[in-house]
Image: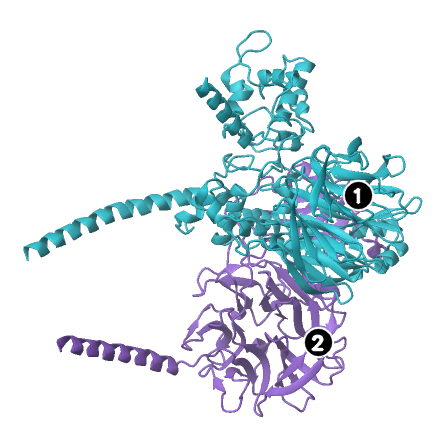
Chain colours: A purple, B cyan
């Protein structure tokens, strides 16, 4: 009798335990499959929402039954945008400010319990955070008075905001970050200079090494949205055509050959697109409006047949301008880092400064051979270095210092000064084929004469490179 | 109550004893694994190392499987049969191509490589790379009816236009056996390029093209050049050599039906460029060589790669009967690249020599002629087309399977299971990882790319671990290295686990490091799955010649020719004792270059050393002779300056006989048995 009673007690205990677990799990509604959107109440004036005075909010919407399923995720914030979901579908990063006059900061929401924690807390704007495969975040540091001089450098930090590390040093203005499946960070670079507005995508390793051009739109075009990559190597974003009079369109490029695979998927569709997000099904979710009098709504888009589908979600009070969907996806590759903060320099090898690819020869006047390079810092010249007979040079450069290179003829006359600002990370070793090479050119298999000697220190007046404290702020 | 107390005491003692053993034991195991792997977080699992790196014994048999590993194949003239060479199965597998079913398995020699069918379709000839012969199979009875002797390491096969002569390409001895099929006798051997494999008769039936995998041995800094040998089919003589600049690993060749073009697979290494990055193709490119067949025809190279995607380890190439499409198997990325031949013709017709030079290093140009990448199973190797050209058969080597591809739709329409084991063992998984470029940034190269046949590629690289232009590194063979630790020329890696760990990904593969299960698997394969070919070229009978014996005595001598004792540390045998011919220590043999960091070098193992030129840590010695005639002026690399030329030659001849460690272990056993019975 006593045994029977014990069994009954045990059964009751287990039933109670299971019921508790069941009931508590019912209370936590999973967001798997939900759309996370940024909604803007006023007119969208700026492509970068952080610059806009119009407040925005982030909401979760069930795409299968949008009506009645809208859940505001950033209540209590003056404005919030740039939602990014981790590959395990458990964490949402966003940029927000709690009061109108606050700075923009990065916040992380646990999608299991909707708890929000502030990640960054400095007195400058931080924006556009995305998850790195190594568990850190990468984000842009913004000043409201951005200029060529200040730029928008990229930083990485731990999930609690600690250990911030600057990874770009060229004073360009980076935004709209994405982590490619190969583990590299893709960033929109819209730096303005006196003669032109850049509109390119730069790619780099998460430690800021091996930064290079990934995509450049046609002259006069303007990249609008963050970039999204699918698992089969397609990359989508929104871009305005030259002149912008025809509205904005969805552009597709191939990961394998991004510089020469541009396709406008929506040239036949009248209206504007604001953002794009690829679904596991292969379809895209796009933010679209048919005319300026309409609000941006979420539509399905078939990229294969270039057909705009039915609206998925719209709001009469808001422009729905950014989209993400909560779902698990493959984690990008976790790239190893060659950066060593114990080393204060990096190495740069150029195989042949005079290399000219045949297409360049056809289109250029510059055929005179360079015999030296001049390295220009931000405020002063860092020195002139003769190049070897084969056109190679090999530099040891103070790390994390922006510079650009111009080529000189035997009379010291500048032949070309179009090189971009470059920076080398501590212990980074970087190579390039030449200055005028097609970005698809690989090096010729030969020993560059320059590496038969020690590298030339840059700045050249420094005989011995001194230790340098690297400032991360 | 008394008993209970006693029980509690016993239990307490047992627990205390258990804890006493567990904690130090755990600590010991942790320290052991940390040492072995060079990291502190590798899982503590005894089985991973102590079970899966066993290569012999009953347990090793239990955890391993015998796979077929198809490498090449041929299709019968009526298209009804496939003949598949099962490289590890030592067999030719007959497949019903209509039913997609295996009919039978015919045992052949060791490590068969290629198959060719006689012109009347009655016989199949299978090259046995580790038996130095060709099996002749009567296809009506599925029996081996004859065995034809070749030179060392026969691989590619071709028949003469009249079908009376079989050409067997001998990879290890770098020559071609010309075999009279009526007599079965080898008529002559033609010396061809370095490490040849593929051979094909041109459509006009005049010339045979023979590919080479290894480049001509040259000092570091000289251009990498690999030869294509042309044989005149009528005269059975060498017609000439053509050179592929900046390329090597030319595995196979195919002709268009019209004969206007020959296409060869190749790899374009960047070993002379400091290995500072993978981005922008700085380490390895993969492509094809095009030989125009007209008078003064050009040799053109085009890449298969794309700017952010590389197509590692091209192996075979076939061209459809209409000459419109070529298919190339990219063994390192599990796909077939489909090339539009008219686009290639158009491109090369309008291109200037400067443009073509540029295209050889251009990653974007492939978009003009690569029309599709067809995914396959693991490690696609040999290709064969059905007679009507409508089906492409692919030997998926590490899948034990044949893929059937529709050449018009360019889709895989079916697969043929060859009946190998279904279980993928840990070592097999390691081999799959080894052969796949997926663990390198953008798939630029696999382990196999620098270690073809799990050996080495004969090149010297500037690994540039610190500064560029320093510390040149001669690629080392991976054959049977399980007992030759430490690894790397500087001996810094005590185990393969460490060698292939995090540092490997930071400086070499430059992408995510191997997961620990993958690291364990690749280590298991490297330590248990790579064997030495039998040294049939220099030690075929296991009996040394008189000259070789004299050379052995010099190698083992303790006094020089003047009668002076050689200090033990300067005797060959001290640092190079059998069976691995390494004492596994570091040494200074006077070879430190101004561009080397000041280090000692790991004493290399010498088994099958004849097949590992160039020599020394930076590959400066093109031959074994040069080690002493050019690079040991002060007798720091053993005492040899007192030797006459004949004596040095005899020692070299002995060194060339050095075979696999198993051979010396078995010799030891034989001597022991003899001594016991006496």
Q: Is residue B503 visible?
A: yes
Task: Check disc 1 and report the residue beneath it.
Answer: B158
Residue B75 in percent (x, y) is at 76, 54
Does B304 appear above or below A87?
above
Q: Position of residue B377 (x, y in %)?
A: 63, 58
The residue under the point 50% across, 22% down is: B671
Numbered disc 2: secondary structure: loop
Q: Residue furthest right?
A: B295
Does residue A422 appear anywhere in the picture?
Answer: no
Between circles 2 and 1, the one closer to the viewer is 1
Q: Chain of mark 1?
A: B
Q: In the drawing, what numbered circle is on residue B133?
A: none
- On screen, residue B537 above or below B488: above
Residue A295 vs residue A346, the one in the foreground: A295
Q: Residues within 10 Å of mark 2 (few under 14, many from 20)?
A: few
Q: Which mark is residue A304?
A: 2
Residue A438: image location, x then y, percent: 76, 56
The extreme front residue here reads B141
Compared with residue A468, is residue B214 higher up or lower down, i.e. above or below? above
> Is label 1 in a helix, a strand or a loop?
strand
Q: In front: B40, or B407? A: B407
**Callouts 2 and 1 on one subunit:** no
Q: What residue do we see at 59% from left, 74% from top?
A: A280
Residue A349 x/y as whole percent: 67, 46
Q: How far apart are labels 2 and 1 at the CA level?
A: 46 Å
Q: Nearer the viewer, residue A220 or A405?
A: A220
Q: Is residue B252 left or right of residue B237?
A: left
- Report in which chain the residue with disc 2 lies: A
């Amino acid at each position: 009798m006593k045994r029977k009673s014990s069994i009954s007690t045990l059964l009751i205990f287990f039933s109670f335990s299971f019921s508790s677990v069941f009931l508590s799990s019912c209370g936590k509604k999973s967001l798997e499959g939900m759309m996370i959107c940024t909604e803007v109440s006023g007119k969208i004036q700026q492509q970068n929402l952080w610059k806009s005075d119009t407040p925005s909010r982030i909401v979760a919407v069930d795409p299968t039954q949008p009506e009645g399923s809208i859940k505001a995720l950033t209540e209590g914030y003056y404005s919030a945008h740039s939602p990014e979901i981790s590959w395990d579908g458990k964490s949402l990063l966003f940029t927000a400010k709690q009061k109108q006059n606050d700075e923009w900061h990065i916040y992380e929401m646990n999608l299991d319990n909707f708890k929000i924690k502030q990640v960054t807390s400095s007195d400058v704007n931080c924006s556009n955070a995305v998850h790195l495969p190594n568990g850190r975040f990468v984000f842009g540091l913004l000043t409201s008075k951005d200029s060529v001089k200040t730029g928008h450098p990229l930083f990485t930090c731990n999930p609690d905001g600690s250990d911030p590390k600057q990874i770009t040093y060229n004073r360009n203005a980076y935004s709209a970050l994405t982590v490619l499946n190969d583990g590299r960070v893709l960033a929109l670079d819209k730096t303005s200079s006196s003669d032109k507005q850049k509109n390119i995508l730069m790619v780099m390793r998460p430690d800021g090494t091996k930064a290079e051009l990934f995509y450049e739109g046609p002259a006069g075009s303007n990249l609008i949205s963050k970039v999204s990559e699918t698992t089969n190597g397609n990359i989508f974003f929104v871009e305005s055509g030259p002149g912008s009079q025809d509205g904005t369109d969805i552009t597709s490029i191939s990961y394998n050959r991004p510089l020469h695979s541009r396709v406008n998927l929506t040239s036949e569709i009248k209206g504007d697109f604001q953002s794009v997000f690829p679904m596991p099904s292969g379809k895209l979710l796009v933010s679209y409006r048919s005319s300026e009098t309409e609000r941006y709504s979420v539509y399905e888009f078939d990229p294969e047949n270039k057909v705009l589908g039915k609206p998925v979600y719209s709001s009469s009070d808001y422009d729905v301008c950014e989209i993400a969907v909560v779902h698990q996806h493959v984690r990008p590759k976790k790239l190893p880092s060659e950066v060593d903060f114990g080393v204060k320099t990096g190495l740069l090898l150029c195989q042949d400064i005079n290399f000219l690819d045949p297409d360049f020869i056809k289109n250029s006047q510059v055929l005179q051979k360079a015999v030296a390079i001049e390295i220009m810092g931000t405020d002063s010249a860092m020195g002139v270095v003769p190049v070897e007979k084969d056109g190679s040079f090999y530099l040891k450069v103070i790390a994390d210092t922006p510079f650009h290179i111009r080529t000189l003829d035997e009379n010291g006359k500048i032949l070309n000064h179009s090189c971009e600002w470059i920076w080398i990370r501590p212990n980074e070793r970087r190579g390039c084929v030449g200055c005028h090479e097609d970005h698809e050119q690989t090096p010729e298999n030969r020993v560059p004469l320059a590496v038969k000697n020690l590298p030339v220190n840059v700045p050249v007046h420094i005989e011995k490179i001194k230790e340098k404290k690297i400032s991360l702020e | 109550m008394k008993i209970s107390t006693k029980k509690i005491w016993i239990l307490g003692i047992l627990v205390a004893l258990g804890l006493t053993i567990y904690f130090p034991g755990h600590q010991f195991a942790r320290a052991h694994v940390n040492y072995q792997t060079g990291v502190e977080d590798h899982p503590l699992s005894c089985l991973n190392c102590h079970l899966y790196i066993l290569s012999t014994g009953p347990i090793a048999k239990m955890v391993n499987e015998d796979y077929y590993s198809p490498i090449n194949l041929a299709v019968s003239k009526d298209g009804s049969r496939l003949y598949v060479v099962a490289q590890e199965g030592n067999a030719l597998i007959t497949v019903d191509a209509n039913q997609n079913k295996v009919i039978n398995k015919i045992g052949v020699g060791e490590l068969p490589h290629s198959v060719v069918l006689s012109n009347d379709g009655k016989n199949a000839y299978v090259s046995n790379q580790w038996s130095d012969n060709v099996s002749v199979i009567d296809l009506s009875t599925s029996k081996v009816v004859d065995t034809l002797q070749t030179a060392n390491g026969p691989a590619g096969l071709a028949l003469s236009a009249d079908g009376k002569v079989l050409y067997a390409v001998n990879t290890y001895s770098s020559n071609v056996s010309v075999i009279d099929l009526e007599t079965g006798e080898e008529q002559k051997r033609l010396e061809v390029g370095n490490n040849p494999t593929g051979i094909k008769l041109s459509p006009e039936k005049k010339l045979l093209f023979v590919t080479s995998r290894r480049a001509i041995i040259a000092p570091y800094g000289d251009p990498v050049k690999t030869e294509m040998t042309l044989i005149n089919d009528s005269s059975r003589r060498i017609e000439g050599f053509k050179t592929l600049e900046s390329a090597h690993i030319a595995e196979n060749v195919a002709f268009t039906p019209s004969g206007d073009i020959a296409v060869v697979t190749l790899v374009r290494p960047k070993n002379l460029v400091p290995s500072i990055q993978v981005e922008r193709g700085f380490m390895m490119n993969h492509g094809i060589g095009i030989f125009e067949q007209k008078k003064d025809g050009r040799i053109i190279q085009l890449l298969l790669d794309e700017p952010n995607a590389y197509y590692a380890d091209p192996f075979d190439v076939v061209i459809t009967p209409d000459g419109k499409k070529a298919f190339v198997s990219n063994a390192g990325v599990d796909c077939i690249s489909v090339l539009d031949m008219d686009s290639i013709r158009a491109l090369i017709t309008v291109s200037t020599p400067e443009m073509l030079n540029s295209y050889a290093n251009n990653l974007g140009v492939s978009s003009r002629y690569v029309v599709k990448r067809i995914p396959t199973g693991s490690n696609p190797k040999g290709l064969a087309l059905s007679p009507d050209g409508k089906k492409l058969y692919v030997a998926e080597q590490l899948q034990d399977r044949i893929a059937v591809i529709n050449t018009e739709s360019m889709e895989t329409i079916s697969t043929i299971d060859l009946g190998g084991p279904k279980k993928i063992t840990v070592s097999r998984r390691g081999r799959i990882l080894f052969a796949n470029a997926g663990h390198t940034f953008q798939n630029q190269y696999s382990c196999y790319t620098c270690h073809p046949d799990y050996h080495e590629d004969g090149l010297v690289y500037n690994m540039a671990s610190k500064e560029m232009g320093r510390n040149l590194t001669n690629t080392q063979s991976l054959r049977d290295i399980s007992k030759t630790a430490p690894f790397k020329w500087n001996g810094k890696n005590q185990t393969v686990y460490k060698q292939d760990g995090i540092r490997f990904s930071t400086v070499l593969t430059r992408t995510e490091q191997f997961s620990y299960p993958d690291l364990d698997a690749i280590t298991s394969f490297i330590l248990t799955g790579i064997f030495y070919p039998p040294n049939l070229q220099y030690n075929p009978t296991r009996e040394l010649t008189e000259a070789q014996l004299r050379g052995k005595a010099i190698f083992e001598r303790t006094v020089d020719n003047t009668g002076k004792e050689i200090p033990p540390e300067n005797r060959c045998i001290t640092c190079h004792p059998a069976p691995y011919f390494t004492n596994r220590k570091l040494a200074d043999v006077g070879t430190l270059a101004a561009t080397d960091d000041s280090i000692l070098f790991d004493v290399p193992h010498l088994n099958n050393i004849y097949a590992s030129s160039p020599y020394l840590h930076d590959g400066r010695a093109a031959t074994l002779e040069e080690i002493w005639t050019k690079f040991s002026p002060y007798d720091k690399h053993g005492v040899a300056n007192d030797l006459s030329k004949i004596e040095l030659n005899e020692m070299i001849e002995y060194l060339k006989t050095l075979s696999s460690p198993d051979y010396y272990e078995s010799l030891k056993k034989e001597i022991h048995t003899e001594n016991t019975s006496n």
